[in-house]
Image (cartoon, rainbow, N blue to C red):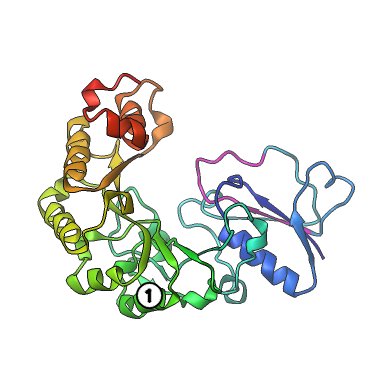
Amino acid sequence: MKIGLIDVDGHNFPNLSIMKLSTWHKQNGDQVEWYNPLTGWYDIPDRVYMSKVFSFSPDYPHPVNAKEIIRGGTGYYYPDGGAELPDEIGHIYPDYSLYPQYTNDTAYGFLTRGCPRGCGFCIVGGKEGRTSRKVADLSEFWRGQKNIVLLDPNITACREWQGLFQQLIDSKAWVDFSQGLDIRVMTDDKVEMLKHMKIKQVHFAWDNYSDRDKIIPQFRAFKEITGWDKRKMGVYVLTNYNSTHEEDLERIYTLRDMGYWPYVMVYDKNKLSRGHITRKLQRWCNMRAVFETTPRFEDYTG
């Protein structure tokens, strides 16, 4: 078979589903390549996979000519994500050759799925379940690469966290917890195991201002135990969702004072006007050079 692939979101981050489908088809002797709309009208693929992760991504702008077209991902089937990949594909080693610009000595994947939180702004609980559960060992997507980027929604809430952390320690690879560790369930034991990893970066989240009294002591304790520099510890700050501008700014200042890098995430950003103060807040906070040289948002004129 001739297989065409379309990463509808663009090629700015590896699409794991596309990578796994590519591996499976190649192992079955099929020809796999990125779909080309300029040649597809005469060199017709037997099947084209179109994967769309984000609902806000525009759809593929070109006509797709194929004997069969299969669309998948949360971007097409919001919020449940549609049909999952069959196990024989979902647990196959990804085809990293599709994204050489992002996967040079870097592995990407999930060790766990699901989250117990059920936050109203997040689809993970409804899509993957309200329990953080182990879905893979590290060897499923890592074969000695120097860097590991984890996409888990809440690995620290998984009952099997200890064994998974040990696998990361044993890998001796640089680990990036890209999607956020849950500071609310962080314990001394978990912090000690994190200290034994080669941590490239950890991310946390302070989504709700109302969590202030219970979340700040956790952040302070983590910083005290690890002694890590702020460049290693980022915190996502959700805005435009159940918080005022003053509460957003207070979270940013508080995190900075505790030795963390705040990073503003704007909920439903496309619904805000270009001149909205939350967009300005995001620019000021997320451009690190500006954030460092202009300590007060009130003084930022950009």
Q: Position of residue 243 (x, y in %)?
A: 22, 37
Per the image, is 115 magenta? Answer: no
Secondary structure of the residue carrying tag 1 is helix
Residue drawn at x 36%, y 60% as measured from the top left: 125
Number of residues whose C-alpha sits closer than 10 Å to that of mark 1, classed few (under 14), some (14–19) or many (20 or more): some
Q: On the image, which quarter does residue 102 sit in?
A: bottom right
Residue drawn at x 63%, y 59% as measured from the top left: 18
Q: Is residue 182 left or right of residue 253?
A: right
Report the number of discs.
Answer: 1
Quarter of the figure that contains the N terminus: bottom right
Q: Is residue 246 left or right of residue 158?
A: left
Residue drawn at x 81%, y 59% as measured from the top left: 46
Q: Residue furthest right?
A: 42
Per the image, is 55 magenta? Answer: yes
Give the extent of the magenta segment: 47-60
**281 above or below 242?**
above
Q: Position of residue 185 (x, y in %)?
A: 21, 65
Nearer-the-camera pick, 159 or 169: 169
Residue drawn at x 57%, y 75% as measured from the top left: 87
Q: Which residue is mark 1?
A: 169
Main SS of residues in magenta: loop
Q: Specify the amino acid type for callout 1.
A: Ile
Q: Position of residue 58 (x, y in %)?
A: 58, 38
Q: Is residue 226 left or right of residue 114?
A: left
Q: Position of residue 147 (x, y in %)?
A: 48, 63
Q: On the image, which quarter does residue 302 sit in?
A: top left
Q: On the image, which quarter does residue 67 sit in?
A: bottom right
Q: Residue furthest bottom?
A: 163
